[in-house]
Amino acid sequence: MKIYLRLLRESVIMAWHALVVNKLRTILSLLGVTIGIFAIIAVFTAVDGLENTIKGSVNSLGSNVIYVQKWPWVFGSDFPWWKYWQRPVASYKEMEQLKARNSLAEQMAFVAFINDATIKSGTNAVDNAEVDLVSHDYKDLTTFNLEQGRYFTENESMGGAPVAVIGADIADAILPGVDPIDKEITVKGRRVHVIGVFVREGESMLGKTKDKTVMVPVNFARKFLDIRSERLNPMIMVKGKEGVTNNELIDELRSNMRSIRRLRPSEDDSFALNETKLLSNQLGSLFHMLTVAGWIIGSFSILVGGFGIANIMFVSVRERTPIIGIQKSLGAKNYFILFQFLTESVILCVVGGGLGIFLVFIGSYLASFGGLDMPLSLANTVLGISVSVIIGIISGLLPAFQASQLDPVEAIRANG
């Protein structure tokens, strides 16, 4: 064991000596490995950060929630849009019928949206706000937090009371410097009382945020809006009971919706049953393509860097041929010489890979100041070091084997 530790120590010293003595040659040779590892790990870090952020936004829609809508979320190149165009939108009445028929559903809610609404209070106004028209159980199917106030009571929801929960940006813009609770605002020309304020969320990767949202009971909106208008994108959200899979819930919903709409067995569905898994699968394919692209881009740089490391090692073997001859004449075994040069090659590659990983770390740290959450993970760090070690072994194997096979006498006489 002492012999191997001494061998490792000597190899590290020689590798460091090669780095210091031949600075320019070493820097140019390591550049390929550095750029290659940087490209691969940077792409992986960016993909991980985007994946976590986007999947977090997707999961906020509810992983166990089925959306009954007119249009599917995902479709292929042969998408028959003319068939989908003729479909009716989901209705509030259909939700009530589904509640009476579905045995696997725990919660249901009807939701519709007004986009580009103007919200006013006195002389203050906010344009391009979103108004969510929701039934009472909406709170049980989605995740949101209130900074102030409360959600609608069941009586307020069922009776269509003129109450609203508003986003933080809207509260700041039209009710600046005052407590917004119990204040009056105008939504679509109707006066409503603010009973709650959402916690500030910031913009999500899907563009959804409660910060510029006003939420009102759908039964209040029914008094002055046609909630079956396609412009409102109405939908029914359904959450299954505990232990019920999405597939089981979808099968029951499909059967009941076909019955409610009186569809014959030969007719296609006139509705879409969407779930977040559809988006996750699409995103998974996208992230896989980005990962493959990162490997391809990085592989070219690593290939060039590998040849550079191999070149350094061949030069190192030639320069140290007399030393190798002396070592072998003193009893050094072939594996001793082989391990010595392999260790040097691996160290050179790890130095280059470490620089690449350090650059990724700096980049991810700077990205955090721009609001991008792309931390360098331990898994990606280990991957970068592992790839560097593998490239070091591959690049140094032939020069190390050549050095181990030198004849001691011929080696000592070389360059003499």
Image: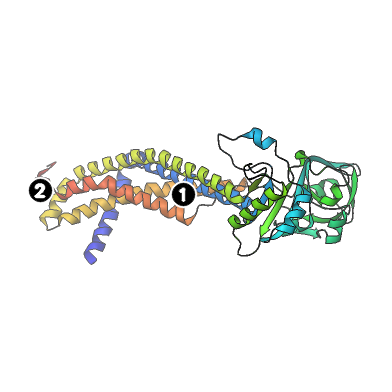
Most extreme residue toward the top, as rendered? 82
Q: Residue at x 55, y 44 (%)?
A: 282
Residue position for label 2: 407
Depth check: give the residue in front, 307 or 135: 135
Q: Secondary structure at mark 2?
A: loop
Q: Residue at x 19, y 56 (%)?
A: 336
- Give the residue type at disc 2: Asp
Where in the figure is residue 334, as x and y percent of width and height? 15, 54
Seen as rendered, the residue at the extreme left is: 409
Q: Position of residue 149 (x, y in %)?
A: 82, 60
Q: Is residue 272 left or right of residue 401?
A: right
Q: Residue at x 41, y 39 (%)?
A: 296
- In the drawing, does residue 363 fall left or right of residue 57? left
x, y percent for residue 258: 68, 48
Any part of residue 290 in sight: yes
Is residue 175 visible in this depiction of the protein?
no
Q: Indicate left or right for 277 with 133 as reference.
A: left
Q: Earlier in the sequence, mark 1 or mark 2?
A: 1
The extreme bottom residue here reads 1
Q: Which residue is mark 1?
A: 358
**Image location of residue 345, percent across then percent down:** 29, 49
